Amino acid sequence: MIEELERKLDSFDSAERKQALLSLSEKVEAGEIVLPDAGADVNLHCHTFFSYNTYGYSPSKFAWLARKAGLAVAGVIDFDVLDALEEFLEAARMLGLKGCAGLESRVFVPEFADRVINSPGEPGISYHMGVGFPSAKLEGEQNEFLSNLRKIAQQRNKGLMGRVNKYLQPVTLDYERDVLVLTPSGNATERHMCLAYARKAKELFGQTDDLANFWSEKLGVQVKASQLPESRDLLNGIRAKTMKRGGVGYVLPDKGSFPLMADTNQFALAAGAIPTVTWLDGTSEGEKAVEELLEVAMSTGSAALNVIPDRNYTVGHKGEKLQNLYEVVELAEKLHLPVVVGTEMNSPGQKFVDDFDTQELSPLLPTFLKGAHIVYAHSVLQQKCSLGYTSEWAKKNFESVAAKNEFFQALGSSLEPEQEDKLSGLSKDATAHEILDIVKRES
């Protein structure tokens, strides 16, 4: 019964997801399911099926699994949309999980126009985020900006698909019929297209030698039967050969292909989120100049740093990437930038949560937990009374970023989900001390 309810959490039918989560919550209240106390692990960067999750997780499913795993704080991130936000935050409150939500996109950084940052082979292009959005219901210029992100991404996908179709004939896709059916709200990604091509090929050739021969010829590598019909290696091979730099369908973006980082920062700030720089591994020319990159980003409002720890080390080995990780975290702390971490889960094989108890990551966990608590506290305060981390209230009430971080960390670590409504409607004259006192009295 529990497994069936968990399966329904990934239904494309929102009513079915909501009912399944309610039923699971009732089983928790009845003592049929025992959930652990929150620990210290965090994941604030999980993509959902509203962009692409390799395991098909909905916002409700991730909230449920995060609560089952005892995460201290959990957050969803999707490409170019905020479609997961309302569902995830509602599910988190129902389950007693500290949650937040945001989005990720690609932006153009003029100051780095001749340097690759973290989008391989694409000088000047960087992945970029906004975290802790209080609502998905935007108006005016913010709604127009958000809608345009989705529109541009889908136009880019359709152009890419047209070029790849010519190469992969007779395996060709119809965007609406074959691709959009794989996502619940029409926000397909390159990974959806790779999956659609794998399934279309199986439909045409079956699970036969012809299927292996087709992919071997098109991808230029020997594809084994064990990789069929849609293994991680096959999907990654399709993406590399047809969609990424050097691929048959790839077209180098120009400076007009993506919004400016400065404009994206202004969008996030106006929508009540924290503009967040993303960092890959410190090996590109752009990321080797990370101090300059952060200076440029912070000059237009970036106020946090996102890293993916699992990409940057191998257990038991000290290498360049691990050293780079330690150095960028040290730099972030020096600049008082909260560090946001997570495992994405938008590619096969990625973990549900980082192994924070390893020798490599355990020294960094306090910094990661601090960042998570700051983002959670911001998310709640901004949603309940517009007194978040990037608000005018915050600018007036703290003498330094360090003092602001101390307050938001203290609030995020002490505030429990069932207390969130106690912060509703606070006056802009409220002091940081008074807010902490409210939470303390309700504890």
Image (cartoon, helix red, strand yellow):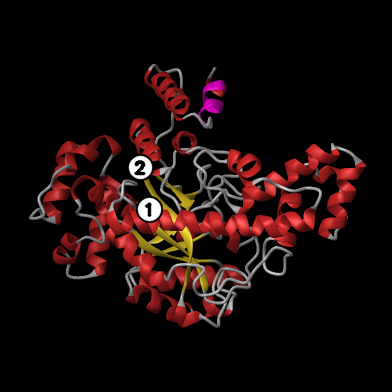
User: Is residue 367 in the magenta section?
Assistant: no
Mark 2 residue element = loop
Which residue appears at 53% of the width and 21% of the height? 2
**Name of the residue lying farthest toward the right:** 209
Instruction: Give the numbered dot on residue 372.
Output: 1
The residue sitting at 28% across, 55% down in the picture is: 140
86 to the left or right of 420: right
Q: Earlier in the sequence, mark 1 or mark 2?
A: 2
Could you give the CA–CA distance between mark 1 and mark 2, rounded to whole angstroms? 9 Å
Element on which disc 1 rests: helix
Where's residue 312, x and y in %?
A: 59, 63
Q: Which residue is mark 2?
A: 98
Q: What is the three-letter code of the residue carrying label 1?
A: Ala
Tell me if label 1 and label 2 are in contact, CB under 8 Å: yes
- Kind of residue indicated by mark 2: Lys
Front residue of 167 and 190 = 167
- Local packing at callout 2 (Cα closer than 10 Å; few below 14, some 14-19, many 20+) is many
User: Residue at image x 60%, y 38%?
Assistant: 181
Q: What kind of secondary structure does the magenta stretch mostly adopt?
A: helix
User: Left or right: where does residue 171 sit relative to residue 338?
Assistant: right
- Where residue 384 sits: x, y (%)? 21, 45
**Hey, which quadrant is residue 228 in on the image?**
top right
Residue 364, percent from left and from top: 46, 61
Quick one: quadrant of the C terminus? Answer: top left
Above or below — where is 91 with respect to 355? above
What residue span does the magenta drawing correspond to? 4-9
* Residue 373 visible to the viewer: yes
* Quarter the N terminus occupies: top right
